[in-house]
Image (cartoon, grey):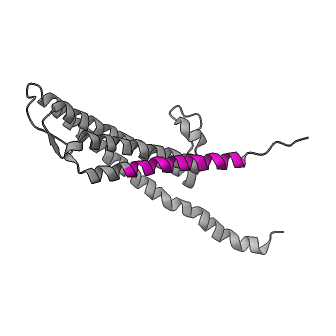
Amino acid sequence: MSDPAQSRRNPFESLIFASRWLQAPLYAGLIVAQCVYVYQFLVELWHLVVVAFGSIGHSAAEHTAHDVTVTDASQAIMLSVLGLIDVVMIANLLIMVIIGGYETFVSRLDLKDHPDQPEWLSHVNAGVLKVKLATALIGISSIHLLKTFIEADRRPEQAMMWQVIIHMVFVFSAFALAWTDRVMVAGAKPKPLIS
């Protein structure tokens, strides 16, 4: 015989559990954002080709890379390549959030024995996902910091200082997340019985 309190609670619990599907449109929106980054990558790639081939025989010409006018073609090419890397790293971050977040918080992906299944997906959980995202943010921040240092003569010192401080906060946060995850995993392991 079923408990009357249990039967009254089940529809509400079912509603709460089903509410996870409200996140599905958010992940669909991130897929649209991924498309925007593909477009951005193609624009950056085209800009790189124009700068690279437009600079042949015109070493003294001015080039624009990321809203900064530079006279050195190699510097403009380097800034364009860093822009491409930045777009790819942000796209990778989006993929981790889309796939990992959906798998962790909405529904399991039916990818059993799929040849293209990402290696990290087999052991993803909220803790692992947070550490991977923090690491990706450090990579993105590093690219931005490198761009800033390349253009250091055109950047205010205070802005560069804040960018370094923010980067170090990302690094510290990633270490803290990794340490917390490690402590939680170690605490979850059953202790061996001493006989």
As drawn, the residue found furthest toward the top would be 57
* First to last magenta residue range: 165-188
Residue 127: where, in percent of width, then height? Answer: 58, 49
Q: Which of 90 and 160 is in front in this view?
A: 160
Quadrant for the C terminus, please.
top right
As drawn, the residue found furthest toward the right would be 195
Q: In which quarter of the image is residue 193?
A: top right
Q: In which quarter of the image is residue 84?
A: top left
- Is 80 positioned to the left or the right of 70 in the image? right
- Residue 183 visible in rendering: yes
* Residue at 58 percent of width and 44 percent of height: 124
Residue 177: where, in percent of width, then height? Answer: 55, 50
Q: Is residue 54 magenta?
A: no
Residue 184: where, in percent of width, then height? Answer: 66, 50
* Residue at 40 percent of width and 48 percent of height: 167
Q: What secondary structure characterizes most of the magenta part? A: helix
Q: Is residue 178 magenta?
A: yes
- Is 14 positioned to the left or the right of 51 in the image? right
- Is 62 positioned to the left or the right of 104 in the image? left
* Residue at 50 percent of width and 62 percent of height: 22
Q: Which of 128 and 102 is in front in this view?
A: 128
